[in-house]
Structure formats: C-alpha cells, structure tokens
Image: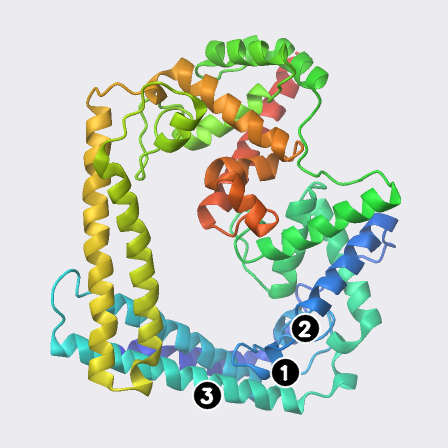
Amino acid sequence: MGNNLMIRIFLPKLISLLLLLVVTGILSMGDQAISQDSKPTTQETVLRNLILLFYEKNSGGSASSNSYRGREGFLMMDPLTGRALGLKTIVTEDYVRGKGLFREAQKALSLGIEAMNAAGVDKASEQLLQLVADYSCEYNRAMDESAGLMQDYRKALKNENDERFNKEASKNLADKIIKLCIESASGNLRDSLACFHNKTRGAEENGFQLNTGNVAFVNKVYRGYIETIEQTGASPVFDLDLHEGASEVEDRWKRVKSRMDIPYKQYLDDVFMENLRTGVVVDPLLFAALMRQESNFNSLAVSYVGAAGLTQIMPSTGKSLGMENIYMPSYYEEARDFFVKEMELKKGAISLFKGVCRNDKRGSALHAVDKMIKSNIRKRKRTELYSRYKAEISGGVKDDRLDPAKAIRYGYAYFAGILRQQKGDISLALAGYNSGPHRVKQFGGLPPYQETVSFRNNILRFYKEYLKTAAVRQGN
C-alpha cells in the first residue's frame, strides 16, 4: 500500500486509542445524563411499554452475528451511550478497539467505492485493481477483528454490573427521555419518537429529529400507539400530524389570505374554494409549503428525473390525473430504465468488493470494477437523457404542468386524494406524494428514503412557519 493509503486507513486507530484513554473519564461523568424525575403520564407509559416491546422483538440474533455492536439490555444501547445517559455500564478495551476497527472497516469500504468509481467509464488499470484489492483486504481484516473483539466483549459482560440489564433503571431512563423528547418536539409524536431513538443511539442531530436511521422504529411505535388508543377509546394527547377540520381551515384562510405573502395565492384560493364546496379540504398554507419545497414557487422548474412545474408532477402521474398535454418522448422511459440498472449494478459492485480479498484478488477486483464501470456508463446515459428532456421542456414544449393554474389544480387534487387515503395523516400524505402511495403501504408508514424523509421534514417546517405568521397576522 502507498503512504496515502496507510495514513487514510490507520489514522482512525490513533483516534480509537485516544477514545480508550478518555472513555473512563469524560464519558463516565455523564455530561448528557438526564435528571428529570417527574412521573410519566398514562400515555407516556404506553409509549415506554411500546418502546420496550419493540426492542424485545428486534434484538434477537444480533449478539451472535457480525452485526453485533455492543448494544444490549432493555433499550438496546451501546455502553458508551448508556453511560453518557447516566447508567452504570461496562466498557472494556475490547469494546473500544472493536468500535474503532468497525470505523476503520467503514472507511476502507468508502475508499474502495471511491477507487472503483475512479475508473469512470474506462478500463481499469492494474494499479487501480490492486488498490481496490488492498481496500477490500483492509475492510475484511477490520470487520473480522472488530467482530471477534465484540464477541469477546459480550462474553465478558456481567449483567448484574451493567444497568442496561436492569429493567427498573431502563424504564426510569426511558420515562425521562420520553418527557424530554416530547417537550423538545413540542408534542409531535413522530418527532418525539425519533428524538428518543437518536438519544439512545448516541446519534448526532442535524436539525431534524426524524431520519432514515430511525424511521422504522418510529413507524412501528407510532402504529402501536394508534392501535392502543383505538382499542382503549382514549383520546390522543400528542400531535399526530393530523389535518385540521374544514371549518377551522376555512376560517383561518379567510382571515389571513389577504395578509399572507404567498406566490400564486389567487390560483390557490380559487382551487381551495372550489374544492371546499365538494367537501375536499387541504389547508392552503400546507399546500403552499408543499410548493415551496417542490419548486420554490418556480413554475418552470424541472427536476433531474422529469418532474415539472410548481407542484413537480411526474409525467405518468400527470397523465393519470387527466392532464391533457404532457411531454413524454419515447426516450423518457429509457432514461428511467438506465437509472434502475445503474443502481442494480452499483449495488452488485459493492457486494463483489466486499468479497475480493476472500477470492482471486485480481479477478474479483476486475469483476467488481467492471460492474461499477457499467453502472457509471448507465449513469452518464441517464444523465444525458434527463438533461435533454429538461432542455426540451424548458425550451417551449407545451406541457400543462408548466401552467401555474393547472399545476396547482391537479397537484392539489392529487395531494387531497392521498391525504384522504391516509385518513388525514399529513406526514403519510406527504410521503405518498413524494415516493408514491404504494411505498407508504409497503413500509407501513414513512419510507426509509432520504429524499422522502427530508421532504416531510422540510414541508412541516415551512407549514409551521406559515401557521405562525398566520397567527400573528390574524391577531393584528
């Protein structure tokens, strides 16, 4: 390996050693320890029990596999996170070294993918193949050593000396975190659950609580909560992302619409009032937030996959909604097919990379890089076709999606249909609008896609801004 590779791979080892020196110092102080002691409410207790049940059902098997990362106990926390939250946990040198080696493995994987992509769409050089093989060997070495050390850590655990295995301590900690997160998320249940997951995973927050790493947990516990209150007949005390009733929305909109600075407000008002008479209601402020996220109110916006207009309607969706003029040349579907194959080949290349060092190194590296090259070729063709589509539709081709009035009318109808399908759940309706209603059904809630989760987060943030502005201007 060259000097650069040595530095990039072994620098994390030094970091791991430093972590070992401080782990019994700084972290043992429990800087993040939660000190609230007020008793949980009945519905907070319901949440806690659902959370414990989730971890009980989703903890099996990990301890004996290479995916084991030291997460244990009733809340499935790693020892460092547990200690930072105020629990007495067992942290050994094996655990710290294993954790550091796992980071080394992920770094080697990232560098390996970077090296495979360096070939672009050309034939790989022998030097590049050797580099890919080196990264694969480093990845496998670090993963194997990390797995071994983590298993040694687990064998050394004594449950009676680690409060992660103490049910009362875990329940008390869960109650405190739930209260803290509910307050932090202003009572929004999904964001509160996401906050809980982030804190018990030691995850860094990036401005939004909900992310792809916690969405499966949020979906499951959220559904469990809804089922529980339906069975008991209790009224929910949390913000469930539910759309307001028609009378509340109509009253607020009539009071503030003249005072709100929203582009295309007259078109939005026309569509809202027309639909209101038929019983179809979407808060104009919510739909304005959707347009802001989709196109930033640019009526000529065209996305990298061909969604167009204020409401970013896809060609096939526009046709299904009854829009008459939709530009959809024969090569459009070809571009989509290139994208699907591109992702399939990339996934295959990464899978092959992981096994390069365990097989014929040069031959396996060549096979992995060849798949990545084929993926990059399809990426280039896909990009060229979508760029052509964007240029043509922006160049004066007639398309109803670029008409502001039609974009709002059909986009509003599409979103209203999904919202009705999701029984007024704004988050699920937004997810359905972005990724398709079938994805919401497939995942039993929000799909774990970065674009979809960010779409939901941003629109709810914009919506809250509009509601806040409306409240101020309604009072003046």
Q: Answer with the quarter of the image where residue 158 lies.
A: bottom right
Q: Secondary structure at mark 1?
A: loop
Mark 2 vs mark 1, CA separation in Å: 9 Å
Residue at position x 55%, y 88% in the image: 94
**Image position of 248 with respect to 161: above or below:** above
Q: Which mark is residue 83?
A: 2
**Residue 137's spot in the image, x, y percent?**
32, 84
> Which residue corresponds to mark 3?
145
Q: Secondary structure at mark 2?
A: helix
Q: Are marks 1 and 3 in contact (CB under 8 Å)?
A: no
Is 27 or 355 nearer to us in this picture? 355
Residue 254 position in % (x across, y down): 63, 9
Does label 3 or label 2 sit earlier along the sequence? 2
Is tag 1's residue or tag 3's residue first in the polypeptide sequence?
1
Q: Which of these two is toward me, 330 or 397?
A: 330
Circle 3: residue type: Glu
Q: Are marks 2 and 1 in contact (CB under 8 Å)?
A: yes
> Mark 1 highlights which residue?
91
